[in-house]
Image (tube, rainbow, N blue to C red):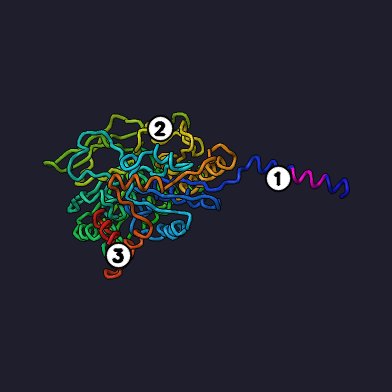
Amino acid sequence: MSVLMRRVHILSSLKQLIKCHGQRQLSHLKVCVVGTGPAGFYTAQQILKDPNAVVDLYERMPVPFGLVRYGVAPDHPEVKNVIHTFTNVLRNPRCNFFGNVRLGADVTLNELREAYHAVVLTYGSDEEKRLGIPGEDLDNVISARKFVGWYNGHPADLEVRPDLQVDTVAVIGHGNVALDVARILLTSPDVLQKTDITDPALSQLQKSTVKRVVLVGRRGPLQVSFTIKELREMTKLAGVDTVFRPEDFVGIQEKVADQPRPRRRLVELMLQTASRTQTRKCSRSWELRFLRSPIRFKADGSKVSCVELTVNKLEEVDGRWNAVPTGETETLDCQMVLKSIGYSSKAVDPVIPFDTKRNLVPNDTGRVQGLQGIYCSGWIKTGPVGVIVTTMNCSFETASTLLRDAHEGLLDTSRQRPGSEYILPLLSQRGVKPLTYEHWLKIEQWELEEGKKKGKPREKLLSVDRMLEIAYS
């Protein structure tokens, strides 16, 4: 062997030695993912790209898919197409689904830490925020989160009883969820009956007398949180007028050019809509009301009859435009209120650190601070912001962090972990009956068959007990 060849061989051997030293070869990396919404599935999808990884998904509901099943509007079936991607994850032989298991109630985080090399928290933000103002608990003042859960068939929201025999609905908030609930209220039931909306919700919407929906936001047109897709849908609703007040857009045109392209297109659409003739052509309408914040709800008996609003002005503080009350007030008559002011979360296990101010688990690119081997993805990582694509990117980052830690020795993989072989007997001792992917397939088959009878994509089961009955039948 020539000197040159020997040098090449030595250099190649050194590179391989360095690579092996810096990147551990894993035997079996056992990972537990808590939550099966988009964050859970996108995290699992990325982790499973490592051929030595095994992922067990735990979900408090008997069924998977989280907000895709219970949060996406029924008239947005294209958004639910991600379920096909998630189903392929479930079909992976190195992935296991265990539904009907609650972290913090049925199993503790420390028990999961003992069973797995890593635990990823992806259980999201499904608590509702409160305004903290008088009259918030009046009849027909409902959180948009619960209203969405009601028409999407979430078992926890079956007790919601919205009275839709009203003329005017006030929606507090200018985000996508606010536009979703407004659209559902104003869309023809003939359109909705072809979706997977629940029968009880459809029945109530068919009897609805809602004529006007007013969306109230505390800041101006440049600060709305909804996207152009949702706005465009609202402006094209059949049989529904869009009513914008031109005076709300004075001075906005001059500021459009300085906005990022997505924001610029959104504001331009609002300006175009505001410039059109405001003559009412239809019996139903929706409106955007800017620079207004609710300060109290008033009642007629026990039911809401109006909302008192404070008029705001915008003041810039540290590059952010804040809504500041001017002292002026006005009253909006309404017989129903939907509060769409965002989601909140919590630590479902006392071991989990939680930042109540930022509404998230403190973390560094997905590594939970102070807890070795614990990671987080989705809204529990970032706070309740963004859409599914945002969650996907966030989850991919966490998965990459976890795999890098495992290969570089920052995550202890020196001993085998039992995974579900340790957790399932514990659950059995506690009387918990987890549902597997095969159980979910039985539930799904029932829902699809019932939906087919009614000309719908599916008819969702509304009771956990009924889900369990069909799963174990």
Sooner in the amino-acid sequence: mark 1 or mark 2: 1
Q: On the image, numbered disc 2 is attached to which residue?
A: 353
Q: Position of residue 316 (x, y in %)?
A: 44, 31
Name the disc covering residue 446, or none.
Answer: 3
* Label 1–label 2 contact, CB within 8 A: no
How dense is the environment of label 3, judged by Cα within 10 Å: few (below 14), some, or many (20 and up)? some
Q: On the image, numbered disc 1 is attached to which residue?
A: 16
Is residue 370 found left or right of 467 in the rendered image?
Answer: right
Specify whether residue 284 is painted magenta: no
| Span highlighted in magenta in the image | 7-13
Q: Position of residue 345 (x, y in %)?
A: 35, 39
Is residue 168 found left or right of 23 in the rendered image?
Answer: left
State the CA–CA distance, disc 1 to disc 2: 40 Å
* Label 1–label 3 contact, CB within 8 A: no
Q: Position of residue 205 (x, y in %)?
A: 23, 58
At 21% from the left edge and 60% from the top edge, which residue is drawn? 203
At 26% from the left edge and 48% from the top edge, which residue is drawn? 156
Which picture quadrant has residue 241? Answer: bottom left
State the CA–CA distance, disc 1 to disc 3: 54 Å
Which picture quadrant has residue 17? Answer: top right
Name the disc covering residue 228, or none.
Answer: none
For discs 1 and 2, the disc positioned in front in the rendered view: 1
For discs 1 and 3, the disc positioned in front in the rendered view: 1
